[in-house]
Amino acid sequence: MISAFETASRLWDEASTRTAPGEVACRAGCFGCCIGLFEISLAEAVLVRSGVASLPDEVRADVLSRARRIVAESARAFPGDAERGLLDPDRTEAADDAYFEVVADRACPMLELPSGRCRIYAARPITCRTYGFAWAKDGAMIHPPCGLNLPGASAGRQLQASIDIGRIDEGLGVAGEIAEELDLDPDVESTIAHAVVGSAFGPRLG
Ligand code: SF4
């Protein structure tokens, strides 16, 4: 599992070497990509929880309070079991879109404001490690880069500086072991907020 996260970070670094000075706006304190929730895998949920568990008490309490608020306030729209923190694997795309629209303006509970620092940087999900550049799979772009990066670049240029998501092994073997331990399907999905307060992922963190 760890290698998948390290690979994601390495691929970001590799992509940045294919850019020219001034093409990448990513920097400490820029946190536009930390606003709104997104799906995370079981392996990511477990890593995020471990990052939160190791935070100082006061910081962890703030993270959990913000996560609980997001989960409670968006529970009615959540396409799954909000209390357990699990997205329904059979949810429709429309239900998915509707939920993520509801939470689109919510800051990630891990985000320290106003500094824009990630409080679980070493334990952040793969999405966070690969955001900024375009994502590609089988030679085709499947997600554009952040609008602040590669300004005015053609699709070909964006692809040239993209991250090949297919090279990231999500560590399914390990996820399978975790799933067995938690009595969950290895393919379950959650969000950062639900992963830290959902009952499916283990005992309460505080
Ligand atoms: S985990 Fe960290 S990097 Fe990822 S969205 Fe939250 S604050 Fe941003």
Image: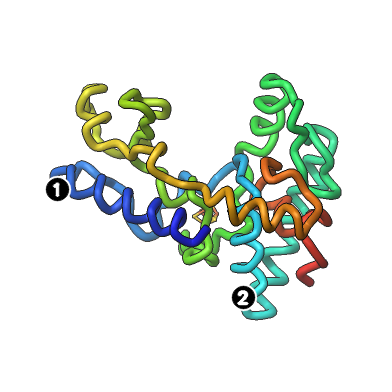
Instruction: Let me know if residue 131 appears in the view.
Output: yes
For label 1, count other residues whose C-alpha is less than 10 Å away and answer few (under 14), some (14-19) or many (20+). few
Return the mark for residue 21: 1
Q: Is residue 21 above or below residue 64?
A: above
Mark 1 residue element: loop
State the residue position of label 2: 55
Q: In the image shown, does 20 or 138 lie closer to the viewer?
A: 138
Residue lying at 78% horizontally and 32% vertically, measured from the top left:
79
Q: Amino acid at mark 1?
A: Pro
In the image: residue 105, left or right of residue 158? right
Determine the CA span between mark 2 and mark 1: 35 Å
Q: Position of residue 127 (x, y in %)?
A: 49, 45
Query: Which quarter of the rendering shows the C terminus?
Result: bottom right
* x then y, percent, for residue 15: 25, 45
Identity of the residue drawn at 48% across and 50% down: 126
The residue at the point 49 percent across, 61 percent down is: 2
Residue type, mark 2 in image = Leu
Crowd class of label 2 (few under 14; some 14 to 19; many from 20; radius 10 Å): some
Pick the front one: 89 or 118:
89
What is the x, y in percent for residue 198?
79, 54
Looking at the rendered image, the disc whose residue lies closer to the viewer, 2 or 1, is 2
